[in-house]
Image (cartoon, grey):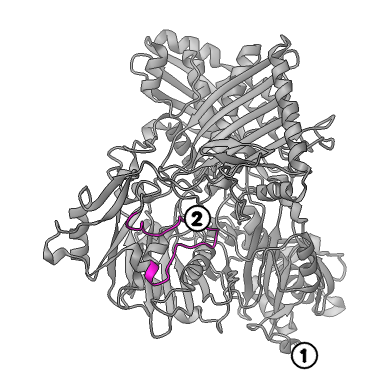
Amino acid sequence: MSSAKQAGFSRRDFIKLGTVGGISLWLGRLPAAQAVEVYPGASPTDWIGPDGKAKYRWDAIRKVTGQKNFAFDFRAPDLEGWPASSGYAFMLKATDAEHVFTGIDLSMLPADLQPDRVLLQGDLAGSGIRAPSSMGKGFYGEHLLLPVGETAPLLGHPVAMLFYRDFDRFEAAKRMLRFETGTVKYGQFTGPRPPANYGAARFVRIGGETPQSPPVFAPFQDGAIKGGFHGDEVVWPPFDPDPSLFVPDVIKRKRGSGFEDALHAADADPTLKERAMDAAAVIADEIAQARANPDKLVLERHGFSQSIDPCAMEPDNCTAWYDADTATLHILTATQSPAGVASAAAEMLKDNRQVPVKRIVLLTGSTVGYGSKDYSVFPYYAIAACLYSGGMPVRMANDRYEQFQLGMKRHSIDMDVTITVDRQTGKFETLKGVYTCNGGGRENLSVAVSHVCARGAQSVYYFPKSDLATMAMATSAVEAGSMRGFGALQSMTVTEIMVDEIADTLGLDPIELRRRNALRTGDQNTQGGVQAGDPRIVEILDRAAAHPLWINRDQAKADFDAANPGKRYGVGFAQVQTVYGSSGDPGILVLEFDAAGTLSMRHCVQEIGTGATTAQQVMVWQALGKAPDNVSFGVTDFPELPLHTARADQAQQDKYAQHDPYWVPAIVPDMSSSSSVYYTGFATRQAARFLLEYSLWPAARAIWSEGAGGGPISTFDVQFSDLRVSPEGLGGGGMAPIPFEQLARKAHDMGLVTGVALHTFSRWEWARAEFDIPGVGVRTLAVDALALRYGEGAPPALKQRMSVAGYDFIKRIRALYPPVKRSSAGPTTYTSAAYIMELNVNTFTGEVDVMRHHALMDPGTMIVPQLVSGQLQGGAAMGIGHALMEELPLYGDGPGDGTWNFNRYVLPRAADVAVWTQTAEFLPPLSETSPPKGMAELGMIPIVAATSNAIAHAIGKRFYEFPVSAEKIRKALG
């Protein structure tokens, strides 16, 4: 029996009376769509100790014993209800983006290797199948396959799909065509024909008298500037009448951290563009005056960050099957955004004439993508192919050559940055930056990445004035998208290197300069928003300044250099903070227990390698003293909460909040933005706490009250706040702990709440709503949708209320949502981290030897410390690779030609990253109620600048263009 079957997966789990399944399918004729991750059902709990601490990841045994775990591992026969055999398909791609595509020639394949079906764009268009536009026209490209007669908008654009009914012929044909240059035919020269540029934006802020004072002008308070293009030249308002001027639309999407709202404000207020440009002129004038003022330092630098491949172990893959008997499209794919795949597939097929599609069922496996599987175009090729396979499932899976050719990359970004400083005080005065992001030939999330690049530029510093312009450019390079770093890596790195250079120019210790300019509690960011809580930046700086690596760096350099002729020792430092969460983070789950104490959870969180599914279960234990016995992850169908969503301005949101208890701003989250532990976990903690407060607590109180004289609780004044969980059960306040199973039985007997389904939403502030809860009364909760299940002993009237998938959907009295404009504040939840890097440079070869590195981080309350450590170690390796070795050419000799693999792409190995000498320290949480902080990207970012700063300390040469290769070092040394 297959692993999936052993886990109890069944198609019956998905058929929920035709419900929409939690995905916003806003076009009336779209088919219903649902999703869930493989491995739902009974789960072993021996991975967690009796003290609630994880001994290892809950999915660890499957991983280390080679069981099927990733989506890539599964085939159609593994899935119950799917056919026993499968077909296979691969794509032919354009390796020329300057000539017209004229067709394909398969004559080199012998007759027995000719495909059973060839699909061209004409076939798809003739059947009404188009590239998804659920994220806006052009997001996934204009066409899935390149039409005959057009020039490829990017290198590596698919031109045809070849389908085979058996694997052997498929594999042989694929190998034969892999490096064949004559299969795809080209005609007339046209030059590059990328799409129109994707967007230009400018975020200007002039602060008030103090960092906490209301700003004179700020994106959050006022708005941002939308730019236009003359070709590739950006143009800012005011715009003269010019038919050749192209101003890209600003499309509000799920991602982008709310910057779109600040840009839309410019359209709503005719005076805003002029006021914003006036503010920018003030900053430009101040920089010009500073250049002529000997009391000011003006540092201007150009930086470059290269194109990088994510190198996730699991390549993009998708298996799709159309079941004609039920008009159901089944999809198994690797994705970080299951709801996005389901809704995009539905939109893509809504008008198709090839087959009728009434329902879409999406399965996902655990995956790792580092952002590259977030809104990837890949699944839609397998989805399209399966509609022409005669009822056979179709598997498409990249090999490593194909992954380099088609997989999303980290954006290459050119940066021109100016910082002005008062020489006497060392205080920063202005930050001006122009950030040009190369998005390649598909838009994807390039606009959002460009905005986040601008946001990240300030790093951990307060700038009284800032003017940050960013452009998302369309080129014929391979598509760039949501890869880890998301623009902030690139911009913060340049800022951090400049800060070191400023310190050197002023004769200041680099950490002391950072301390003078660090953001403090209540200081505003470059958007005019205020960071949540205590940023603890100065605390990390103080710890770093006291570390022996930093204190002894000059003496250590002198000793090492004297003892090692031809080598130069250096120590570098950098500190950044990165956001976790986005401008609209929902969470949704169901948590329930039966009378025997079996605890079950169905959850929206998707496993993408970070251990999010483990952490959610640990959070449940921390509240209830028990981890779930049955779990399902990656779920999008929650019939207990029949919610819907629609985009809303402030007036519409106010109306929904008061009059429509089924409306929420967003239903299910994407797995991105390091949001799982705090934002998605917030829903988990709310659900577990609800059961604790309204079920286990009254059940425990009843048990403790049994016996003569009111029982053992009668003398004490035990309150809810006194409760504590322990390996023995729920206790506290001097009471004997009660095992969960006994509490569950009592809760059922008393007819208490035994199941809760809830939804949460944050827009840099949590939504709240009032609910009239039976037996409890009116309560205001940090949730915006709530449904309850009652125990076996509940009265008939209460049981009759459980009419929505066995739950009582409690219609909220009213909801209070954060203002729509709140998203324009930019992120307010950050995690701060720093690195001290120790290395030496061989002055003959230019090679860099990483000797040791020490990390400092403020993770808040760590739910699973081992996962935090793992993220930090992996991030350090990725950052060192970015700093020193990883790079992809953008165009002719780049991955779009289909010849790249790990024989050409250099990745760091253990010997390159000081794996055995790395150390780390974590700030303790400020209190026992401090929340956890997201941090997946954070381990990677500061080490890049710290490496460059250490090289500067070693050889006296600064590098702003990455990677800092041995060749660049040799050239700098002459």
In this view, the residue farthest toward the bottom is: 796
Instruction: Determine the main secondary structure of the stretch shown in magenta.
Output: loop
Is residue 800 positioned above or below 500 on the image?
below
- For the residue marked with disc 2, what is the amino acid? Gly
Is residue 129 covered in magenta? yes
Q: Amino acid at mark 1?
A: Ala
Residue 128 sits in which quadrant?
bottom left
Of the 4 image quadrants, the one containing the N terminus is: bottom left
Q: Which of the 4 quarters of the picture holds residue 775? A: bottom right
User: Is 619 displayed left or right of 119 in the figure?
Assistant: right
Q: Nearer the viewer, residue 327 or 157?
A: 157
Expressed as whole percent of the image width and height from the top left, the position of residue 891 reads 36, 38
How far is mark 2 from mark 1, CA to CA? Answer: 53 Å
**Circle 2 residue:** 138
User: Which of the 4 image quarters holds residue 937?
Assistant: top right
Q: Secondary structure at mark 1?
A: helix
Question: Which residue is pictured at 44% across the width and 10% down the height?
Answer: 561
Instruction: Write down the region rendered in magenta.
Output: 125-149
387 relative to 663 in the view: left or right: left
Q: Nearer the viewer, mark 2 or mark 1?
A: 2
Mark 1 — residue?
797
Q: Where is residue 154 shown, x and y percent of the image?
A: 39, 47
Q: Secondary structure at mark 2?
A: loop
In the rendered image of this protein, does residue 574 appear above or below residue 472?
A: above
